[in-house]
Amino acid sequence: MKRALLIMAAVAAVSAPAMADEALAKSKNCMACHAVDKKLVGPSYKDIAKKYAGDAKAVNMLATKIQKGGSGVWGAIPMPANPQVNDADAKKLAAWVMGQK
């Protein structure tokens, strides 16, 4: 019984931050155009993480794109600016995106 509780606690600890950041992405309307594992209007978060894997500047660059928008990297449809996202949340979201595998 104790072992089962420890396993459940460990799973909750690992998945809680991911779920919290997904909740943040939903609350900031990111999920209207992006999904974790499939292309919608914009690329999937997994594709973004794959494209920028190994780039030490990726989190900061993505945080800026989250707030200010961008165009041309993933095709003709531009990503609109999202000024409702503050600096801390933008970095948290960008780090979460880069953690998608």
Image (cartoon, grey):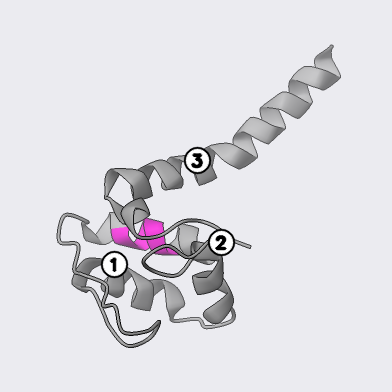
Residue drawn where x is 40% and y is 60% of the image: 34
Relative depth, front residue between 72 and 90: 72
Amino acid carrying label 3: it is Met
Disc 2 packing (10 Å; few <14; some 14–19; many ≥20)? some
Q: Please state the horizontal and vertical placement of residue 81, each as a whole percent of the image.
A: 18, 68
Q: Which residues are magenta?
A: 90-94
Amino acid carrying label 2: it is Gly
**Quarter where residue 1 is shown:** top right
How many angstroms separate mark 3 from mark 2 (CA)?
A: 12 Å
Relative depth, front residue between 85 and 13: 85
Picture disc at residue 66: 1
**Quarter where residue 37 is shown:** bottom right
Disc 1 packing (10 Å; few <14; some 14–19; many ≥20)? many
Question: Does 70 sit above or below residue 85?
Answer: below
**Which residue, given by chain and number where applicable, does mark 3 sit on?**
19
Earlier residue among tags 3 and 1 = 3
Picture disc at residue 39: none
Q: Are marks 1 and 2 in contact (CB under 8 Å)?
A: no
Earlier residue among tags 1 and 2 = 1
* Magenta: main secondary structure: helix
Question: Does 65 sit above or below residue 18?
Answer: below
Indicate the secondary structure of the residue bearing disc 3: helix
